[in-house]
Image: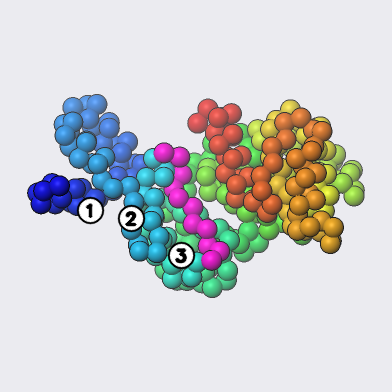
Amino acid sequence: MGNLELLRVTLSWQRPRVTTAEAIKLLEKFRAGGVGREQVLHAFQAAPVADLGFAQVDTHRALRKGFPEVIFGAGKTPGQVVKIATTLVAHEQRVLVTRITPEHARALRKQFKHAVHHEPARCVTIEKKPLPRRAGSITVICAGTSDLPVAEEAAVTAEIMGNRVERIVDVGVAGLHRILSRLETLQKANVLVVVAGMEGALPSVVAGLVSKPVIAVPTSVGYGASFGGVAALLGMLNSCGSGVTVVNIDNGFGAGYAASQINALAAGS
């Protein structure tokens, strides 16, 4: 590769990156004849990655997925999380940080005036402009209060992605009448996230009451033979309830994200 070609490639990776909103405006201008093809190509040839040394931030995630890259806080220092969030905030209207500590939360709230610490969910959201709520709803159900952190992670994830979320708390199978009394709410939802530890029976019960998809989330809550959530995971994978999909142990984020995608399809958005 010659020097001029190397310089061209290097400069192309330093161009400003195109956000989702900018891409839409640019394509609309192109369709209306306001910009030429070369200008559009130039904009989209920008590198979709911001190299922070310790992290490669995907700045085009929202273009492909409809939502920006989510920061997983566990294992990262508060400084690293803040730097990644700063990069994302420069391009996006909203950012989600999961599995954070109080130290992460303090650093983020100091840096960003829009940062909100969702303490039970162990999440921080940064929203310059919240998404409008799409039609339809997601219901998040947790079997016991001990499962609440995982359930709240699912709920916060679904909410920042533009969904209306109904919460039903502490309705495990030890008192079956509690979930039966919420039948109307269950049946109105487009998709349900059901969070349970111990033996993990609640998703099967819910699946037998509704005609909508059920996303089961096993938690690590339980005594010795629960094996840190493996017992609940295996119980859910072997559910006799039709339409039950299972995510990993304690993965409230994954359940909330998937529920949002399903609700978007159901709502036609």
| Amino acid type of the residue that numbered disc 1 sits on in the rendered structure | Gln
Mark 1 closeness class: few <14, some 14–19, many ≥20 residues within 10 Å: few
Q: Nearer the viewer, mark 3 or mark 1?
A: 1
Regarding mark 1 in the picture, which secondary structure is present there? loop
Tell me where residue 265 appears, x and y as whole percent: 55, 30
Q: Nearer the viewer, residue 210 or 215?
A: 215
Residue 69 magenta: yes
| Amino acid type of the residue that numbered disc 2 sits on in the rendered structure | Ala
Query: Does 157 appear above or below 266?
Result: below
The reply to whether discs 2 and 1 touch (Cβ–Cβ < 8 Å) is no
Q: Magenta segment, which residues? A: 64-75
Q: Where does label 1 land, which residue?
A: 14
Q: Where does label 2 land, which residue?
A: 50
* Upstream in sequence: badge 3 or badge 1: 1
For residue 26, which quarter of the picture? Answer: top left
Mark 3 → mark 2, Cα distance in angstroms: 14 Å
Residue at x 57%, y 71% (from the top left corner): 102
Residue 64 showing in the rendered view: yes
* Upstream in sequence: badge 2 or badge 1: 1
Q: Is residue 184 left or right of residue 24?
A: right
Residue at x 83%, y 49% (from the top left corner): 199
Residue 144 showing in the rendered view: no
Tell me where residue 64 appears, x and y as whole percent: 41, 39
* Upstream in sequence: badge 3 or badge 2: 2
Mark 3 closeness class: few <14, some 14–19, many ≥20 residues within 10 Å: many
Regarding mark 3 in the picture, which secondary structure is present there? helix
